[in-house]
Amino acid sequence: MIRSLLSPLVHLFYPHCCELCGTDLSRTDELLCMTCQDTLPATNFHLYTNNPVSGIFSGRLPVTQATAAYYYSQASGLQRLIHRFKYRQRKDIALWLGKQMGHMLQESAWAATVDAIVPVPLNPRKEKERGYNQAAVLAAGIASVLNRPVLPQALVRSQYTSSQTRKNRISRWENVQTVFSADSCVNGRHVLLIDDVITTGATTEACGHSLLEAGAGVSICCLAYAYR
């Protein structure tokens, strides 16, 4: 009763607003209002074995399943959310989006076979500059829903690489093909590899090969698919 009486007063001085449209959120909404949540461009790829993300790795990387939660589109608010958690220290946004990914994965039978969650690592220098690894925060959100352990040290990025943003597919692959190594802790486990945005899949593919060489079975889940 006390909480219900105090809540409106606290809300007055510490407004809880939608991250995208700025409207006042209800007590049950965490980051976005329901209208803005509904505008996020969900792919539903997790429900289909053959989808555009799994097609990226066909003939390149033997995966159990590959998916992305949303389409990466400049016309949607997702781009703004990604920019804020990558460049404005908004870990809370990445954690919330990770939870949404986890709820989507719960709808898939294959997700029940996942033993552990592995984020794509950042080079330590870049992680220090940013303050955290956004893929690890997404992984933490997913893990809180799926109740699976996160293995942040399962993959190590041993070299600092230049940005992939303006590179073509071949250049992206050459930029990352030798920079990852996997720990033996993944041996015999079905791991879910997590990254933020997938375009050509070069970074994810390099990580996947390292995990396979260490004895893991690999599935992939990215936050967003940047289709071309």
Image (tube, helix red, strand yellow):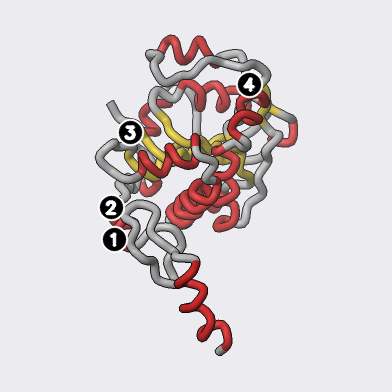
Circle nearer the N terminus (2, 4): 2
Disc 1 residue crowd, few under 14, some 14–19, many 20+, Cα 10 Å: few
**Mark 2 burial class by Cα count in 10 Å: few <14, some 14-19, many 20+:** few
Residue under numbered circle 4: 180
Where disc 1 sits, the SS reads: helix
Front label number (4 vs 1): 1
* Disc nearer the start of the sequence (3/1): 1
Closer to the chain start, of discs 4 and 3, is 3
Near-viewer residue (141 or 23): 23
Marks 1/2: CA distance? 7 Å
Q: Quadrant of residue 181?
A: top right
Which of pointers 3 and 2 lies earlier in the amino acid sequence? 2
Q: Residue furthest front?
A: 13
x, y (%) of residue 188? Answer: 68, 37
> Which residue occupies the foreground of this view, 77 or 144?
77
Q: Which residue is mark 2?
A: 39
Q: Secondary structure at mark 2?
A: helix
Q: Quadrant of residue 73?
A: top left
Q: Position of residue 44 (x, y in %)?
A: 34, 48
Please name the amino acid that badge 2 sits on.
Answer: Thr
> Which label sits in the foreground, 4 or 3?
4
Q: Are marks 1 and 2 in contact (CB under 8 Å)?
A: yes
**Can residue 101 be seen here?**
yes
Question: How crowded is the residue under tag 3: few (<14 C-alpha within 10 Å), some, or many (20+)?
Answer: some
Q: Which residue is mark 3?
A: 52
In this rendering, would 222 be left or right of 129? left
